[in-house]
Amino acid sequence: MGVSKDHYYRLASNLSKERIQAATSLIKELAEENSETEYKYALQRLMSGLASGHDSARIGFSMCLTELLSLLSGSEALKYTAKTFLSDLNTHLDKTVKAKHKGKNLRAYLFAKIFGIQSLIGSSLLDDPPHSLIIEIIDELFSIALTKSWIREISVVTIIKLINKLHLAADREVIPYILTKLAENSLLLSMDGLLVYLTIPVAERKNLSDLASIQRSQHWKNDDPLTKGNLAVLKDAFLDRIVHNDNGDDEDNNESETNEKDKKKKKKTKAKNDQQQPQIQKGSWNPQLHYVWVPLLSELMENERETSQEPPQKKKKSSKGTKNDKKTSNKLSLATFWPTFDATFFSANASPERKHTGLQILDLSFKLPSFIPEFFSVLFDQNITRCLINHTSKKDRVLHSLSVNVLENATKTSKTLRHENARLCMVRSLERQCVLFDRVSKSKIIRDILSNIFDDESDPNNLETEVTFWVEIIDWIMNKSYNELSSKTNNKDDTHSLEEDVHTFIFDSLLNVVRGNKRLIKAVIEKSNDKVLTLQVISQCKEILEYFAKVIYVKAQIPYSGSTLKLAKDRLSSVLSDLMECSKNQVDWSGFLVEFLHKYDQSNELITTIDNLDKIEEVNDADQDSDVDVDADMGYDSQLDIKQVKEKSFKAWNELAKSVKSTGLNISKSRISKCLIMLLSTALLELYGGDSESVSILNDLDNVYEDFKQGNESSNILDTLIDLMLSYTTQKSKLKKRIGNNIWESVFLDIKQEQLDRLFDVLMTRENKAGMEQLFNQAIDEYEDEDEDEDEGKANEENENSENKLKEGTESESESEEPDEESEDNVDRNEKIEEVEKSATTALAKALKIEEAGLGHRKNNHDISANREADEKEEQEQEQENDDDNEDDDDDDDDDDNAYESDESMSDEQMLAIDSQLSAIFQQRKSSLDELRSSSKNGNERKLEAKNARELMALCKLRVLDLLDSYVSNPETQIQIECASIAIILLDLMELTIDINVGEKAHKLIKKTCKHTFQIPEDKLGDIFDLLDQVLSRASKGKFAALGQACSQVAIYLVRSIVAVNPEKYEEFISRATEIYLKHLIKWAVTPRDKANASLFTDFVNWLNSKRTPRS
């Protein structure tokens, strides 16, 4: 059959799999044929192919040639030797490559020789060669290396392969010969010479160097490149400089020059000798790393580990081991070598090519087996870190991608080394060089390192190691990082800015270490059976909360800046929110803070104490610019003692905490108790922060607790909790949203239609400024109630014929509302001016101790515009000191003589006493009016305000939809009849909303709701059939396809639930449902304007068909 020649063509394929198949088939066929002619042809063809520049020909042909030579080594008939191969290789290449000393031909010729010799080294034909043949191969490789600089490295690497293959690293004939050849060609102090030296065992380097013929100016100091004193030579080697070691031996360094003429003479002699040295071509820059870096870094790391493990030795006067100790301490380690590397490759004036090489070397260091976490602090040196920051922070930098990859690989290494806390080592190393590394480099490296300690490789049943690492990181951040980072970066000019940066790092890191490890916290608290581990995690989280609380609430020797306190408050809020998400009301996190702050409150160490806000009236004075009546908003007497409210709430919180630990509560009461505990502790925490609104919340919660303790109707408790939930859920704060969700998770199993209606009110609120004011209990203008039907008609017209109109609704709504909003602003402004006047009148009446009606008589007989003119005159007079106010008040005195008669009875002392009070009242009135006048908004401001109102309303509705989603997803509630009302209200929402996200989410929730059936009492069946009729009628008026599809889904949902009431009445129920569908089908057929889609009826038929098949 012969050997197929097609295999030779496939050997040049770019596909490695195809090359391997071709080589395997060729060798197999040659072995089966066992013909000398075929062998010779294969050798000739493969040797000639080594010079080919086609695709991957050299790789394929050299691989196949290695296997062929191994095959021939076992052939006794052919008797093919390595020496014969070298001769044949030269002969065939001379014939194949013409003009081999020019251009591409020279490249092909040299690489063909290299690949041919490598094939020989890799084969079994060179298993036990004589030294003469080895020397011949080495000479051949040196001749190739000296031809061109770009092939020198691969030639020396081939020599190293030969040494390793034949185990010649300590050979006393071959190694000295190689060292001599390197020295003769000025390569001993180059990267290639360094590679050869690193191949020799450390103990044999000096002995083998002594056997080589090397001049003093050409050898490494101590005959070992990795000893102290060679750093300067190593630096020159890295820069590809051909240098001579001028240090000589130690004895030469100690010789003194007594005559200046001898010095000059020696310099001339040295220059002459340098000129006589053979000059070789310098190597060109190569983006690929030199082979020397792997053995070099590996040995440096091993030396570093040995140095760190050695115990400190006492000095001895005389010892036989002095020399050995000196040699051990004389080794170059990673720590002593790295500053030279850093200055060489990452100096300020280093070229991008050199930095590229340096980053590749840094990346290689993380991947070496000998790398340990302690090396992070060595590798991230000053210049390296600066380079990484500069190139990572800007995407248009040349080395941006490489810098990002280096940091990502370092992060992977820190996560892979699980036997030690490598994450902490890397964080400390980066932050020592640059505080706020993530912000400066515009990366997320520190955040990623601190996150996901519990990953896919972790054992869920054994989390002790992960928790230990997590605790160590937190301990360093809270207790050690400030001193460490401040001392390491104290070279900054602005120490105040430095302190803020360190505090920012601490706050951000504590948030990241909690947020990024929620999976670990949740696994320990919810699933772990190890109580000790659970208590350790909870205790550590408690320490984080107390750390923030101490910064925010407790007096410090050196007060924190306002920006630092604000950041700490934001981070504490986020940490609380994440912890609440992890524990699902199993742990009262805010309760830890309340208990902590209560202790400091007792010792009067809080920044804002409760005693400073002794009366609600004082809180109102602080908020006197507000247009809302705080007293009325609070819903209780303004003279109520805040401290009393606090103590009462704290007592209720303690009682509830004790009751939860007892086993006497049923499941429902236990859920409400945990919910009240969370709400009380959260409101108390807000009270400690000086939030006046928390007092009203605490008062409501105290009332709820009293009802709960006395066993009163649960509906009142649920109503209050739902109101609180809505007030929390509709705020932008993530913590408030989490609190609202926790309330819902505690009560949604007990709620009825009344409570759901409160949620429906939010969904049915219009998405504009008036709707926002209505939702947040602010003043509502009368225009909202005018022509409500007409407004709804306009809203429907905006949804013309398709879903795309829903997206356009936002723009058209804002345009149609613009005139209304302008008139609304004018009316609102007038009303606020009138409120300011009333407030000033009331304050004057109290100050003068007269009836308010007397002062208000004038205002009841004039319109708003007249009052405004009088106010302006009065304000101008008030601005001038010691001027009489009689000029502006003459008319008032005529009308209000009776009101001011009481002034005549006042003494001078009394008038002086109230003078400052009157001045403050008029000043407050003036500032309020000025603020109102300056608040007049132009068109763009009104548009922006309307846009913000729409976005806020959309956010509120999305959050309420999330709550309803959890309701219809729970197996216990998804079968309740209330789910039908949810489906109907979602249809209303799809019609009403002008926000595309709200509409889409409502439709998705309808689909989820309609997957199940709900239970219907038989006395409610008639109502459900009426509801089905209404849904089908709604579909006939739908303006866009999604609404029609949703109506069809809800209709089928209702029918399925009706049928499930009593399977024995299936035919009766289907008959009634079909009659309703038939009525609407006829109407749809005869009414062209009917908007219903045909799928409304086909969906019903398809469902009937699905029910029909199993019944038969």
Image (cartoon, grey):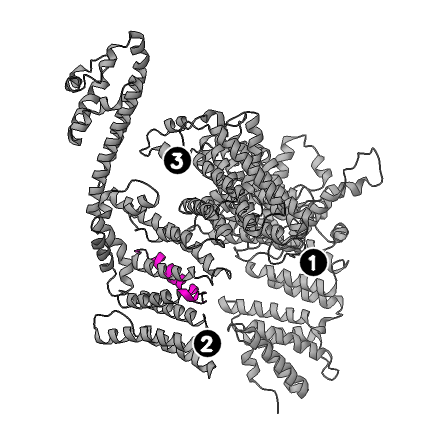
Residue 178, labelled with which disc?
1
Q: CA distance from mark 2 to mark 3?
A: 56 Å
Residue for point 57% across, 61% down = 151
Does residue 41 appear left or right of residue 852 in this picture? right
- Asked if residue 35 can be seen in this view, the reply is no
Does residue 1032 appear left or right of residue 468 in this picture? left
582 shown above or below 177:
above
The answer to the question of whether label 1 and label 3 lie on touching residues, with beta carbons closer than 8 A, is: no
Q: CA distance from mark 1 to mark 3?
A: 97 Å
Image coordinates for residue 845, horizontal then vertical, percent:
28, 21
Residue for point 37% across, 36% down = 633
> Which mark is nearer the camera, 2 or 1?
2
Residue for point 52% across, 73% down = 14
Foreground of the two, 886 or 705: 705
Q: CA distance from mark 2 to mark 1?
A: 100 Å
Q: Which residues are magenta?
A: 993-1019
242 shown above or below 573:
below
524 shown above or below 26:
above
Tag 3 residue: 635
Foreground of the two, 532 or 81: 532
Magenta region includes residue 126: no
Amino acid on which disc 1 is placed: Ile
Quarter of the N terminus within the rendering:
bottom right
Tag 2 residue: 1064
Image coordinates for residue 1069, horizontal then vertical, percent:
39, 74
Does residue 701 appear left or right of residue 656 in this picture? left
**Label 2 environment density (alpha carbons within 10 Å; few <14, some 14–19, many ≥20):** few
Amino acid on which disc 2 is placed: Glu
> Which mark is nearer the camera, 2 or 3?
2
Which numbered disc, 2 or 1, marks the residue that appears first in the sequence?
1
